[in-house]
Image (tube, rainbow, N blue to C red):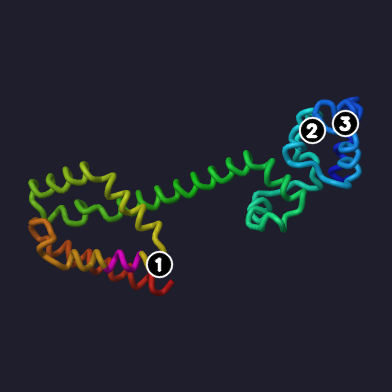
Amino acid sequence: MTIGEKLKEARLAKGLKQSDVASKLGCAATSLTNWEKGKVNPSLEVLSSLCQIYEISALSLLSKKYRYEDLVAIADKPVPDRSYEEQVALNFSQPILSKLIAADAARRDAETNARTAAFLQNTNLLERFGGQMDKSEIDAVRNEYDAHGSADQDILFAFHSLNKEGKLAFLSMLSGMISDQDNLQPFSRMDVAKEYTLKKISEEKDALRKE
């Protein structure tokens, strides 16, 4: 059945005449005839009003159920290239689409959080170099991390959001800063931490270049 035929069926199911509906909409009864025969399509605003009068969902008028991927594809089309049904599907699926997009964003955020947590856990400075630092130095690092841990994570989030070229540029900048001894804190055996970190950055850059 066409959208027009389904609108007629919905009207008859409510026991309404075309003149009854036309009166509610403030239009001519001939408009109902044209919509139901498929000669013209009602505007989306009028269609919404018709669905409220008939107590039906606009999506129930469509010829098929549109999936998330379908709606994304329709949204990518220029408006003039969309069929009337596609436009109806997109417009009246917006609440559903918004929830799906939000759920997808939440899923990606959770994955990023998990990757960052794993990174922090696997590169804990105190675990790697704590045996070569005295207690005052360990306490100093721990206090600084407690004070700026959220900022550290924000930097990691920013790194993960960069494209390949951006990551390489960031790592190169980081290597340059770490290579300059004047930029490092005066902890004992910081040379070991510096050598290890520069090695890891180099390995990460090599891996990125191979992608």
Magenta segment boundaries in residue numbering: 167-172
Quadrant including the C terminus: bottom left
Sort mark 1 into few (<14), some (14-19) or many (20+) by Cα contacts within 10 Å: some
Q: Nearer the viewer, mark 3 or mark 1?
A: 3
Q: Is residue 23 left or right of residue 174?
A: right
Sequence-first disc among 3 and 2: 3
Q: Position of residue 19 (x, y in %)?
A: 90, 28
- The residue singled out by tag 1 in the image is 164
Tag 2: amino acid:
Leu
Q: CA distance from mark 3 to mark 2?
A: 9 Å
Cα separation between marks 2 and 1: 51 Å
User: Can you say whether 180 is above or below 61 in the image?
Assistant: below
| Residue at (79% x, 28% y) in the render | 53
Image-based side of 195 in relation to 47, left or right? left
Residue 72 locus on image (x, y percent): 63, 53
Q: Which residue is mark 3?
A: 11
Task: Give the residue type that dot 3 points to.
Answer: Arg
Task: Please state, as top left, top right, bottom left or bottom right, where the N terminus lies in the image.
Answer: top right
**Element type where label 2 sits in the image:** helix
Left or right, 4 with reference to 200: right
Does the residue at mark 3 contact the one at mark 1 (Cβ under 8 Å)? Answer: no
Disc 2 crowd rating (10 Å Cα; few below 14, some 14-19, many 20+) is: many
